[in-house]
Image (spheres, rainbow, N blue to C red):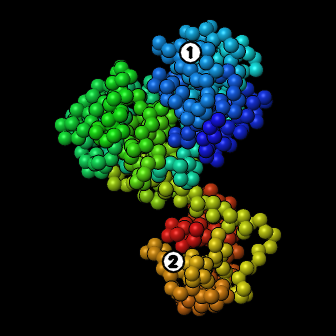
């Protein structure tokens, strides 16, 4: 018997949770970002449970793909297919399309004990519910596991009507940080289309009106010119508004000498497979589509996604950009270009909309100089680039900052860890210390050079947003660095207000926190202290920590 396929730690965790809870939770939900290997997770669940089972997909092309992956994970598996002319109902594990299965359910006479539903955000539809009810009636102990990257639906229907509990979840940013997906970079191009005049149907823009506005010679040429200027040579997938739009955009690419082709749902499987095979081999550089390649399409070489279809659907957007996130040798990231229109009424989904928490997104907007009005309207400067690395860095900053806050506020008595008693108000950082000079700061930070350990002194000038190392060779001890740093503070704190600011016992620091400080702290989701001195320490610590992490002076 062949050894089972090696699994990533989170895949093992997901499988283990399903097995552990199989008797307590009969309708389980796994949420795993695109590229996490949901089919591998499903295959391993089948292998370990080793029972009469069904794998249900909503699209025909996913059926054979799932069966193939299961045999990679479990070569000895007894796998069959229900699709078209194939009707292998006697097999132990059957991979099937829901459309074929719903008409052949009665032919499966053996008791089904496990059903895994792929892309299970579709599972609240009537066809799926009919299948689920049929097999659940025959076996009250039936275990149903749904897997999806995007549990939200545009029609507002809740997956909780089918599934009882999320047993495992891993998101896109976690996978990027772990090195299992590439980083995303996002840019935005204003097409000039007025989206405020396009109606919403079933939770998203009306497709016919979108196509009428976006499938124009001017917009298609803008897309191709953008490709030539920003991502020429990258294997690219374009998501369009209609089949005709996909056909016309591919023709525009070819008119510029770029090898391109469209795929759509009316094509025969063989024709579509042939086009996508040429695309994967690089013979075709751009493939255009509408709602065909959002799910199940796996081509790791793709490194550019052209969103020529503005959307209000987070699910659709996540599925689309996921096509470019898989790892491939030499591939560093995936460029996502939003061809958005101007929208004063609709809430557009963009790359920034799907990454990070609201706090992290707002921090990135501030850093990039983007106003909320610009973000929602689509009028963001096209040269501004948003990246998942921006949000991950904000996460690191906030995590480090929260650690410093915990150290500062959970102690009954603040303990000065500096070796030398000081009259100055040293502010503990996640790594090191700083003194706020008002116009800047002096920082004590341990050296990151393994061959030259010790402590460096860094000076930060706020007005110029510039930080530099005062001593290139680290001081051997914290005490030695502290003495030198305090000499620098004495020299730089020349103004009376600065002298008061740097002193630990300055009377002014005991005054009530100001409204301006409260506003800043609330914006950063920080606690509100009682005095101006404590508020200044918090804000200074955040700013310095952010800058030191950005420059990788601390890690």
Q: Locate residue 542, reporting x and y percent.
A: 59, 66
Depicted 227 relative to depicted 274: above or below: below
Q: Position of residue 76 (x, y in %)?
A: 61, 29
Crowding near pointer 1: few (<14 within 10 Å), some, many (20+)? some
Identified at 18% across, 37% down, the residue is 255
Q: Residue at x 55, y 78 (%)?
A: 449
> Residue 460: which disc?
2
* Residue 313 drawn at (x, y percent): 48, 33
Depth check, front residue: 326 or 8: 8
Residue 41 visible in the current orientation: no
| Tag of residue 88 | 1
Based on the displayed image, in which of its 4 quarters is residue 282 positioned? top left
Badge 1 marks a residue whose secondary structure is loop
SS class, disc 2: strand
Badge nearest the viewer, 1 or 2: 1
The residue shown at (53%, 49%) is 180
Q: Residues within 10 Å of mark 2 (few under 14, many from 20)?
A: many
- Between the residue at mark 1 and the residue at mark 2, the CA separation in whole angstroms equals 70 Å
């Amino acid at each position: 018997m062949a050894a089972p396929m090696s699994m990533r730690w989170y895949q093992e965790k997901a499988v283990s949770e399903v097995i552990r809870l199989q008797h307590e939770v009969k309708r389980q939900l796994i949420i795993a970002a695109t590229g996490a290997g949901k089919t591998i997770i499903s295959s391993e669940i089948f292998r370990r449970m080793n029972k009469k089972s069904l794998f249900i997909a909503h699209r025909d092309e996913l059926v054979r793909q799932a069966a193939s992956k299961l045999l990679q994970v479990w070569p000895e598996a007894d796998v069959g297919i229900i699709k078209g002319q194939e009707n292998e109902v006697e097999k132990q594990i059957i991979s099937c399309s829901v459309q074929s299965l719903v008409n052949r359910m009665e032919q499966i006479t053996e008791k089904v004990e496990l059903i895994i539903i792929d892309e299970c955000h579709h599972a609240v539809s009537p066809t799926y519910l009919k299948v689920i009810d049929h097999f659940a009636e025959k076996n009250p102990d039936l275990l149903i596991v749904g897997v999806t990257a995007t549990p939200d639906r545009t029609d507002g229907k809740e997956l909780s009507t089918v599934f009882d509990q999320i047993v495992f979840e891993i998101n896109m940013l976690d996978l990027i940080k772990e090195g299992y997906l590439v980083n995303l970079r996002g840019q935005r191009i204003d097409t000039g289309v007025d989206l405020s005049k396009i109606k919403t149907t079933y939770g998203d823009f009306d497709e016919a009106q979108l196509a009428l506005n976006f499938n124009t010679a001017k917009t298609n040429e803008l897309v191709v010119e953008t490709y030539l200027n920003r991502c020429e040579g990258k294997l690219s997938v374009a998501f369009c508004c209609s089949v005709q739009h996909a056909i016309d955009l591919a023709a525009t690419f070819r008119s510029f000498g770029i090898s391109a082709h469209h795929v759509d749902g009316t094509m025969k499987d063989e024709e579509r497979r042939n086009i996508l095979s040429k695309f994967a081999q690089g013979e075709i550089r751009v493939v255009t589509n509408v709602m065909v390649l959002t799910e199940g399409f796996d081509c790791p070489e793709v490194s550019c996604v052209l969103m020529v279809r503005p959307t209000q659907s987070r699910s659709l957007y996540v599925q689309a950009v996921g096509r470019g996130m898989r790892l491939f040798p030499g591939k560093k990231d995936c460029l996502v270009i939003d061809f958005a229109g101007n929208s004063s009424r609709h809430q557009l989904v963009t790359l920034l909309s799907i990454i990070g928490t609201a706090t992290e997104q707002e921090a990135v907007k501030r850093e990039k100089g983007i106003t909320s009005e610009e973000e929602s309207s689509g009028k963001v400067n096209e040269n501004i680039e948003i990246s998942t690395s921006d949000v991950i860095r904000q996460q690191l900053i906030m995590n480090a900052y929260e650690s410093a806050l915990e150290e500062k506020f959970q102690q009954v008595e603040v303990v000065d860890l500096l070796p030398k008693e000081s009259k100055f108000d040293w502010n503990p950082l996640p790594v090191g210390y700083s003194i706020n000079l008002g116009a800047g700061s002096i920082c004590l930070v341990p050296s990151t050079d393994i061959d030259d350990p010790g402590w460096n002194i860094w000076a930060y000038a706020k007005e110029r947003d510039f930080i530099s190392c005062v001593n290139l060779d680290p001081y051997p001890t914290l005490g030695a660095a502290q003495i030198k740093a305090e000499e620098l503070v004495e020299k730089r704190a020349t103004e009376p207000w600065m002298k008061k600011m740097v002193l630990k016992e300055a009377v002014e620091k005991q005054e009530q926190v100001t409204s301006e400080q409260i506003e800043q702290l609330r914006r950063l989701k920080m606690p509100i202290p009682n005095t101006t001195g404590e508020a200044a320490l918090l804000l200074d610590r955040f700013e310095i920590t952010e800058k030191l992490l950005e420059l990788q002076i601390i890690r």
